[in-house]
Image (cartoon, helix red, strand yellow):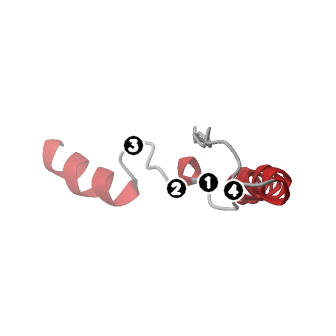
Amino acid sequence: MATIGSASLSAPVHASAGLAKPLAELRTFWRQFIAKAFNPYRPELHYMRGPGPAWRAKHLGRSR
């Protein structure tokens, strides 16, 4: 599971930057969140779940 965080705790330099910076951080957070939450790649769908038919044909043919 991915974690998204922001560690910016500095005080604003002047009043106009005081509102702009938190909004920019919020925008960045939501962009990262949406990108990770709706990523179509699901690696668990591609994991192998055991030996396949080719492995069985090769190894079971020897034991019999």
From the top left corner, tell me how far across and down residue 41 is, in percent: 62, 61
The dot on residue 1 is none
Q: Disc 2 or disc 1, which is closer to the eye?
A: 1
- Image quadrant where residue 64 sits: top left
N-term mark: 4 or 2: 4
From the top left corner, tell me how far across and down residue 40 is, in percent: 70, 62
Give the camera-side residue of 12 and 42.
12
**How far is the residue under mark 4 from the one under mark 2?**
24 Å
Q: Are marks 2 and 1 in contact (CB under 8 Å)?
A: yes
Residue type at the position of mark 1:
Arg
Residue type at the position of mark 4:
Gln
Determine which residue is flagged by label 4. 32
**How far is the residue under mark 4 from the one under mark 1?**
17 Å
Give the camera-side residue of 34 and 18.
18
Q: Are marks 4 and 1 in contact (CB under 8 Å)?
A: no
Q: Disc 3 or disc 1, which is closer to the eye?
A: 1
From the top left corner, tell me how far across and down residue 35 is, in percent: 71, 60
- Image quadrant where residue 1 sits: top right
N-term mark: 3 or 1: 1
**How far is the residue under mark 3 from the one under mark 1?**
19 Å
Determine which residue is flagged by label 1. 42
Determine which residue is flagged by label 2. 46
Residue type at the position of mark 2:
His
Determine which residue is flagged by label 3. 50
SS class of the residue under badge 4?
Answer: helix
Q: How many marks?
A: 4
**How far is the residue under mark 3 from the one under mark 2?**
12 Å
